[in-house]
Amino acid sequence: MREHEHDHDHPHDPITTEGEAPAAARARALEELLVEKGVVQREDVRARVDRLVSRSPADGARLVARAWVDPEFKSRLLADARAAAHELDLDAGPSPVVVAVENTESVHHMVVCTLCSCYPRALLGPPPAWYKSLPYRSRAVSDPHGVLAEFGVELDDDVELRVLDSTADVRYLVLPRRPDGSEGLSEEELAALVTRDSMIGVAQPVVPAPA
Amino acid sequence: MTFRAGDRVRVAARSHEGHHRTPGYVKGKSGWVERVHGSFRNPETRAYGTDGLPEQALYQVCFAQDELWPEARPHAADRTCVDIFEHWLEAE
């Protein structure tokens, strides 16, 4: 890397990018600057990263399973996902706003962020790599049935497909359909059926066939 | 909030220098307001170090798939819904 001119008024160690991806080097340089200028504290950055990566699809799955066994909870979840999550000691945070949408016999939702990688991280953890990929982000809106087919989902002709593009301050959580054959299962067993992809709307939970 | 659920709207076809959250594939397209999300800081100014105030109304706007991708011959009932700030919407 070319040595940069020192005509600005702060000292720092030489900036090198040896063995570091350009995006990582840029993020590190930004963090160094923001910490040095007192805009953020290093501990706050670490705490925030820790909090985000500590969330997982198991959190969202608890919400879905509760909604499957408790219709009143489901109504509250669809009306105000943040408040409903709070009932299960899950913190969806004040922003962005989380909106839950229900897949039914006649309507199927799937979620994308065509502009970047907006995702309900507070309830599902970090998004999968494919969710952030250009092919998914473009084809989810232009060829949603084709994308669903690649995920193994084929919708009946009378099902209305709704693709939700989370372009602003709202994150969407899909409440998938409760699978056939799950009638006798406990809430905990149901939660184990709820996959990350089913809460993005590119998969449907299934009850595994008996071994 | 200028618009209510059910109102027909068209997304402005203008280009915009700099950060904005209106995807190109809905610019100039007609749809309807499905849901009023509330008011949020304006990402177009917030991205450049300001507070993003005044807040702008944000709507979930739905478009029939064949309005967006007619050449793809999509299923008639399918739709794509995009969250759009009020200053990008025109009454239709």
Image (tube, rainbow, N blue to C red):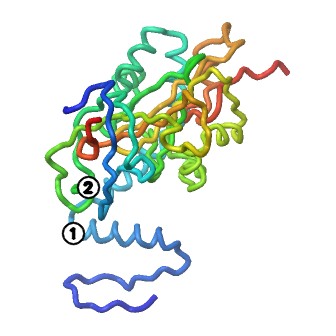
Name the spot of residue A110 as percent of width and height, x first. Answer: 54, 34
Q: Chain of mark 2?
A: B
Q: Residue at x 68, y 13 (%)?
A: A182
Mark 1 = which residue? Answer: A37
Q: Chain of mark 1?
A: A
- Give the side of residue A98 with respect to residue A129, left or right: left
Going by the numbered disc 2, the residue's amino acid type is Glu
Q: Secondary structure at mark 2?
A: helix
Q: Is residue B40 above or below residue B78?
A: below
Quarter assignment of residue A99: top left
Q: Secondary structure at mark 1?
A: loop
Q: Is residue B75 above or below residue A112?
A: above
Q: Residue at x 17, y 58 (%)?
A: B50
Residue reaching furthest to the right: A211
Q: Residue at x 54, y 10 (%)?
A: A69
Q: Residues within 10 Å of mark 2 (few under 14, many from 20)?
A: some
Residues behind callouts 1 and 2 on a single chain:
no
Q: Residue at x 35, y 51 (%)?
A: B21
Going by the numbered disc 1, the residue's amino acid type is Lys
- Give the side of residue A20 with respect to residue B12, left or right: right
Front position in the image: A118 or A115:
A115
Q: Which mark is residue B44?
A: 2
Front position in the image: A186 or B71:
B71
- Give the side of residue B34 with respect to residue B51, left or right: right
Name the spot of residue A58 as percent of width and height, x first. Answer: 55, 31
